[in-house]
Image: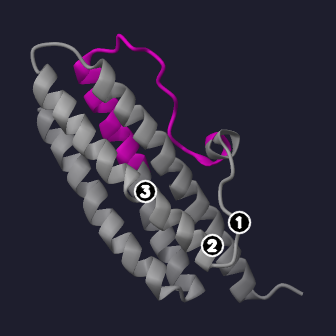
Amino acid sequence: MATAGDNSKTALVNELNGLLADHFALFVKTKNFHWHVTGPRFRDLHLLFDEQAIEIRDNIDMLGERVRKNGAPTLTSVGSIAGATAIKDQDDPTLAAEAMLKELHDDNVLMLDRIKKLKELAGEAGDNATDGILDDLTDQTEERIWFLRSTLQ
């Protein structure tokens, strides 16, 4: 019979895999915008998008290993990423720079919401290590949101 602890661990792992999927999807989208941005602010946005993509990418392995340390399987394919992410695809290579900024801003806000939900789940599951990691991810995500919001103003 499943215990409340088992249920809280399952909920935590499911959301960790969702956050992992969000990182994969947001990394791809941010790199896409890095490659396709054009206009008078090309250089600044090209560099900003690359910096943010690298930061997002650097969290992918840590999140996957956190799932494994919790004794669960992680994402296994592009299809599993697509099924678990809240980040929507953007396939338009001609998207205006302002639209790219707004979309990345909104996607990072979605990611921050997931992190905050995960923080509660980590507490319920008694997973202090995940709780600490989420503090760092919160700070990073809030900084990306701040940069994107400030650039949009």
Tell me the CA gap for discs 1 and 2: 6 Å
Depth-wise, is mark 2 or mark 3 nearer the camera? 2
> Could you say where residue 40 lies in the image, as x and y percent from the top left?
9, 14
Question: First in sequence: mark 2 or mark 3?
Answer: 2
Tell me the CA gap for discs 1 and 3: 23 Å
Q: Is residue 119 above or below residue 91?
A: below
Q: In screen coordinates, is 122 left or right of 50?
A: right
| Dot 1 crowding, Cα within 10 Å, few <14, some 14–19, many 20+ | some
* Magenta extent: 82-110
Residue matched to label 2: 68
Q: Which dot marks residue 73? A: 1
Res 1 quadrant in image: bottom right
Q: In screen coordinates, is 67 left or right of 134?
A: right
Residue type marked 2 = Arg
* Badge 2 element: helix
**Residue closest to the eye, 4 or 44:** 44
> Could you say where residue 24 lies in the image, as x and y percent from the top left?
49, 46
Residue matched to label 3: 113
Residue type marked 3 = Asp
Instruction: Mark 1 and mark 2 in contact? Answer it, CB < 8 Å.
Output: yes
Q: Is residue 102 above or below residue 26?
A: above
> Could you say where residue 110 lies in the image, as x and y percent from the top left?
43, 48
